[in-house]
Image (cartoon, rainbow, N blue to C red):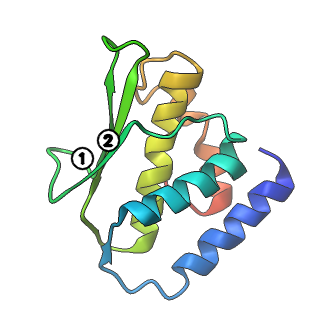
Amino acid sequence: MQRKKALRLKRKIKIATMNDQGPYRTTKKEINFWFNYINNQMFDNRLPHFDRIVVKKWLKEAIGQVVSYPDKNPTRFDLEMLKKYSSKKEFIDTLAHEMVHLYQMYCRKDTGAHNKLFYSFKPKFKFLGLEL
């Protein structure tokens, strides 16, 4: 990630979450906006758009997840996000976290687990003020 892009993303996140009072209601429009912005700034537009975005009232043991369908050709990736987050910051953290999983599976053909590749993003997230 280029330093200039990283600083731009950090500033955008800080401004967006400055008066964050929560709770934050998720919309597909916001998911697409932030996906495109983070994809451009952090992943150099290497990530494909999710095949499907589902906003759910609750998820079992998760606050967001990428669901992959490896039996499809090509592999299909769906994003599931909660309808409501405690704050906009938590929403952005969660989306960026799920984008790392998409990067693992799509770009690196990895399992998408919380492994060494996943945690290699920790310094980038810390710099941006995000939680992995």
Q: Which residue is drawn at 63% across and 57% down?
A: 37
Q: In this view, does 37 lie to the left or right of 8?
A: left
Task: Tell me the SS state at disc 2.
Answer: strand
Q: Which residue is drawn at 43% across and 25% down?
A: 112
Q: In this view, does 131 lie to the left or right of 10?
A: left
Q: In this view, does 118 lie to the left or right of 61?
A: right
Q: Which residue is under mark 1? A: 62
Front tag of 1 and 2: 2
Task: Tell me the SS state at disc 1.
Answer: loop
Question: Do labels 1 and 2 touch, CB within 8 Å?
Answer: yes
Q: Residue 91: x and y, percent?
A: 40, 63
Q: Residue 101: x and y, percent?
A: 46, 34
Q: Residue 48: x and y, percent?
A: 55, 35
> Between 117 and 73, which is closer to the camera in this rendering?
73
Quadrant in which the N terminus appears: top right
Q: Which residue is under mark 2? A: 65
> Between 79 and 90, which is closer to the camera in this rendering?
79
